[in-house]
Image: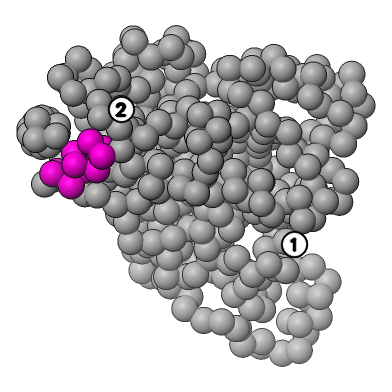
Amino acid sequence: MSARRKAINPRSLGLATRAIHGSHVAPYQGPVTTPIAQTSTYRFQSSDDAVRYAAGDPGVYVYTRYHNPTVRELEERLALIMGCEKTLVFASGMAAITSAIFSLVRDGDEIVSTTALYGGTYRFFRDSLPNHGVGVRFVDHEGVPEIGRMITRKTRIVYFETPTNPTLAVIDIRKLVAAVRNAGRRAGAKPVIMLDNTFATTLNQDPFSLGVDAVVESGTKYLGGHSDLMAGVVAGSETFIAGVHGVLKHLGGCADPLAAFLLLRSLKTFDLRVERQNRNALELATFLEGMRGVKRVIYPGLRSHPDHRIAKKQMAGFGGMVTIEVAGGVRSAVRVCDALRIAVNAMSLGGVETLVSIPVYSSHINMKPAELKRHGVTPGMIRISTGIEHVDDLKKDFREAIGRR
């Protein structure tokens, strides 16, 4: 790995270890793992508890849509790992993204966003927000300086991803933050800078240290890591999270206690899994680069990547995602994916197994050719989420599948 490995974001390794294995000093007796509070409602010792809850006492549990002990333990650990004041866990990544957005915008407000986004987010911006009177102004990721010229008094959020899905472009976060702050002062606006950090994870990229205000992430992916749960995370200041929590109560995208338990389990191997996925991705990308039938390999860790220097500067690791473009367009991409025997043809990422998908048939389905072009997505693209298998097995699998193409 070209970039130096960082410790987890919090200030010390001891704090990071506590975050992964337990945020409190363990009692002398009791379970090693966090118990699952699999309940919808909670017994009051007396009606005084209801009065305390109404007065704002956070220690009184009422209803799992509002809060749950297992979910709260997960949120506290994630806040430590991500180096922020508070996090909120949702039923899915999209529930996290939409709730975070709705907590900040009103009729007449605007969002400035980079174009290269996860397809679900892009379609939410394109198809749903206009129905609520919220406008979205898009800028290509190469045009970060243009963001400053797009911000007005109506701008409430500046939203972006890096690395982008699936083109793995890397945006200089410090430059974007500086451009937004300067433009906001000129326009008399204070937009919230929000980053989807799913592809990088907090282990490879620390957005808060680079000036970002809020982070959203799909817990289904690297945080969960085993392709067996759905979750989403919103992270930021206590004040921001309080506003998002109000939306969660109204829209109902609360996390299930069992999913929270599984995510707590997954955090214990989070660092180990991501380290292995980083190594596998870099070695596989290097192997595929120059292979006959592969038009290009996109991976921030390769020197051939146009944003390699930016990635090396702001990332501790280059991530587990690799995108390739095969000659012959979507038909060739289909033949390669269908010929793989170790890598799994499935729509997701971040799991311990290597997954492949064709963006025009998955994350960017139902987009017009002009939209795909603006996103940088081509028919022959294959998105690879490297798992933790032996990399020699992965190399052989891709070599044989691409050879059969």
Q: Position of residue 123 (x, y in %)?
A: 59, 48
Q: Quadrant of the C terminus?
A: top left
Circle 2 crowding by C-alpha within 10 Å: few under 14, some 14–19, many from 20: many
Q: 101 or 83: nearer the eye?
A: 101
Q: Which residues are magenta?
A: 331-340
Location of residue 324 (image quadrant) = top left
Q: Horizontal placement of 232 versus 44: left or right?
A: left
Is residue 291 positioned above or below 344 on the image? above
* Residue at image location 86% in from the left, 51% down from the top: 107
Q: Position of residue 22 (x, y in %)?
A: 43, 53
Circle 1 crowding by C-alpha within 10 Å: few under 14, some 14–19, many from 20: some
Quickly name the residue at label 2.
325
Q: Position of residue 60 (x, y in %)?
A: 68, 74
Q: Horizontal placement of 4 versus 106: left or right?
A: left
Name which residue type carries label 1: Gly
Q: In terms of secondary structure, where does tag 2 sit?
A: strand
Is residue 52 positioned above or below 372 on the image? below
* Residue 337 located within the stretch drawn in magenta: yes
Give the prevailing secondary structure in the magenta stretch.
Answer: helix
Q: CA distance from mark 2 to mark 1?
A: 43 Å
Total numbered labels: 2
Q: In terms of secondary structure, where does tag 1 sit?
A: helix
